[in-house]
Image (cartoon, coloured by chain):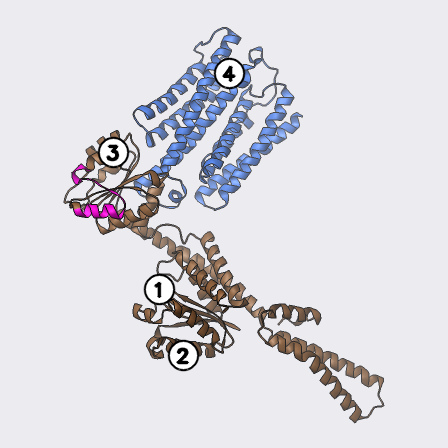
Amino acid sequence: MSILVIGLNHKTANVDIRERLAFNGQKLEDGLLGIHALPEVQEAALLSTCNRVEIYASVCSDKAAENQIKDFLATFHGIARSDFESSLYVHAEADGIRHIFRVGASLDSMVVGEPQILGQLKDTFDYALTRKTTGFILNRLMNKAISTSKRVRTETRIAENAVSISFAAVELARKIFIDLATKAVMLLGAGEMAELAARHLVTNGVRNIRIANRTYERCCELAQEFCGLPVPFDDYLNQMAHIDILICSTGAPKYVLVKEQMQRIMRERRNRPVFIIDISVPRNIDPAINDLDNVYLYHVDDLQQVVDDNMLGRKIEADKAEIIIDEEVGKFTHWLDSLDTVPLILALRQKADEIKIEELEKFRHRCPHLDDATNEAVQYLVTAIVNKLIHNPTVTLKENAEDREMLAMAVKKLYKLNGYDD
Amino acid sequence: MLLMGTLLFEFALTCYFAAAIIGIADIVRNHKKASKLIVWITASGFFLHSAAIAYRYFAAGHVPITNMHESASFFSWCIALLYLMLHFRYRIGMLSSFIPPLIFLMMLAASLLPRQIKPLSPALQSSWLLIHTVFAFLGYAAFTVAFGVGIMYLLQEHYLKRRKLGGLFQRLPNIQVLDDINYRMISLGFPLLTLAIITGALWAEDAWGQYWRWDPKETWSLITWFIYAAVLHIRLVVGWRGRRAALLSILGFIAILFTFFGVNFLLKSVHSFV
């Protein structure tokens, strides 16, 4: 019994291969059922996202199953095996378990720590559950992947701190203002990055957006997109009294806002805090403005610095996460090993043999006058009875039934095989 | 009876000490559960402390806010009360690192001051005692919390301005909520202090026959009152908030410490029982 993972992701395969091997729509169901029907595969689940395609299976023999699955992928997608085989990774046993745990904990993601992957993994297993392609091994593995991911999230800071400039801007805004929903944002000039920052602010609750741009058409266009209010560009200084967050990217060659102007604005605002993000190069906002009370000025370079630091932080946290994952993989492998019934069957057989030999010995002592032929007949009879008695339990234990774990426990108890542990 | 009260007091002191130590340690080495633990320890301390004050009330036969030990103890009790209320209202984990040390320090001061119960001097035998002291110390406690939150504000503002966005910055709440709590605490403390001064004057007329005698205690209370009046006035009229408001609340707290401790130990005051 082993866990097998076969897959490809953004690191091993280019977009072309990923697209050709993706399981979308109806293909997902057909593919999943097809893989589950392979003779070597006992349980299967299938994950297909834009960044990765992965097959999780519980199998008897890694090598044989690997071969069958690869052949299946080739025929199912109509691609020659040689075209995609080099992009695949195969992890078996403990490595397979570790891979699934790492995927769930978002350590294998393009942006380490991003939270979507766990949801996608959950969906994958939920879907497999409805198609009845998973059994108690993969179901347990799934639960462990989720709980491991939660452990990683609570015990490390892997998912904290923004790793993009626009997110960093939102996080800073949150450290300045109580409630973003009541704050007003102004876009002064509209670059791509300014738009992105504005979009993040909107998804985080900002409702009041004003846009000032030199070309009026672009201004209206953006206003429509954000349900905002277009304002004349030359009026921006008057607007500032009502603006809590200013995102500036005008591309002007000189400062559009200097300290004296800001001082006046702050008096008018009665010192309510202002967050100013200057995305322009060269700077559009006089850096000296940051010296004023209740004004917080961040240039895009400052934000980039924040992001770089956070990225570094995530790498450090990822190392802590790997330790947690090692621990959980150990626990799961141990559980999987305990399922193995071969030692139990051997113990059962040994016990039966011991009883048989003991009883035959006693019989010979009690009846020493019997001739060899009779003795042999008795031995034959006893052996036949013992074998018949343990035949069914042995076969049942060998089968991979749903309740095998329970049966193994029962056999252990009924035959007092506690000491058999290898 | 008195022994029991002393024991309860010591237990409460121990709880506050533990909460303060964990709180300060948590600034340096953050642990997710620390702030919850601090709240529970402080709540236990607060419970024991309340019992200690109740015991002392029965042992002495009058409101136990009549000397420096009792007053400092009651001061500390009021801060603990406000801290617990604030915690359940705002759920700001970092409050647990900044307020419990103040509770503990005030309680420590109480534990170092002479504790014996003396017969009540005639001037204090009045129903004004309860009203005047409760107003005064609840007001002081509100200003103390404003001081703690003001420190938090200055720290967070420093991080934002200097772009030091490290661990402590991440854990401190947004500066606007800190400014807001600071303002609320001062707006709570100010009317209480006003009432304490008015009831004090009425009581003085009752006991000594004069409303106001420019006793050092009275003078310093008035100075404190003017500082906080200025904080509120400038905020409402000119819109001074944030850093300047936080700095002023620190100045006000220093004035309170002097009114409370300094006047009694350094200056000669008719009010020197407290």
Query: Per the image, is A232 magenta?
Result: yes
Circle 1 crowding by C-alpha within 10 Å: few under 14, some 14–19, many from 20: some
Q: Secondary structure at mark 4?
A: loop
The circle drawn on residue B272 is: 4
State the separation of the CA atoms marked 1 and 4: 76 Å
State the separation of the CA atoms marked 3 and 4: 52 Å
x and y percent of residue A418 in the render?
Answer: 67, 69
Three-letter residue code for mark 2: Asp
Given residues A82 and A371, the one toward you in this image is A82
Whether residue A67 is situated above or below residue B252 in the rendered picture? below
The answer to whether the residue labelled 3 contacts the one labelled 4, judged by CB atoms less than 8 Å apart, is no
Q: Which residue is mark 2?
A: A71
Q: Which residue is mark 1?
A: A51
Horizontal side of B240 relative to B81 (left or right) equals: left
- Have a look at marks 2 and 4 and say if they share a chain: no
Q: Dividing the picture into quarters, in which one does residue B188 lie?
A: top left
Which quadrant is home to the C terminus of chain A?
bottom right
Q: Secondary structure at mark 1?
A: loop
Three-letter residue code for mark 4: Ser
x and y percent of residue B13 in the render?
Answer: 56, 32
Which hue belongs to chain A?
A: brown
Question: Magenta stretch?
Answer: A217-235
Three-letter residue code for mark 3: Ala
- Give the residue at x 43% y 28%: B185
Horizontal side of A250 relative to B36 (left or right) equals: left
Whether residue A108 is situated above or below residue B135 in the rendered picture? below
Circle 2 crowding by C-alpha within 10 Å: few under 14, some 14–19, many from 20: some
The circle drawn on residue A241 is: 3
Please say whether residue A301 is visible from this viewpoint.
yes
State the separation of the CA atoms marked 2 and 1: 22 Å
Instruction: Write down which chain is painted blue.
Output: B
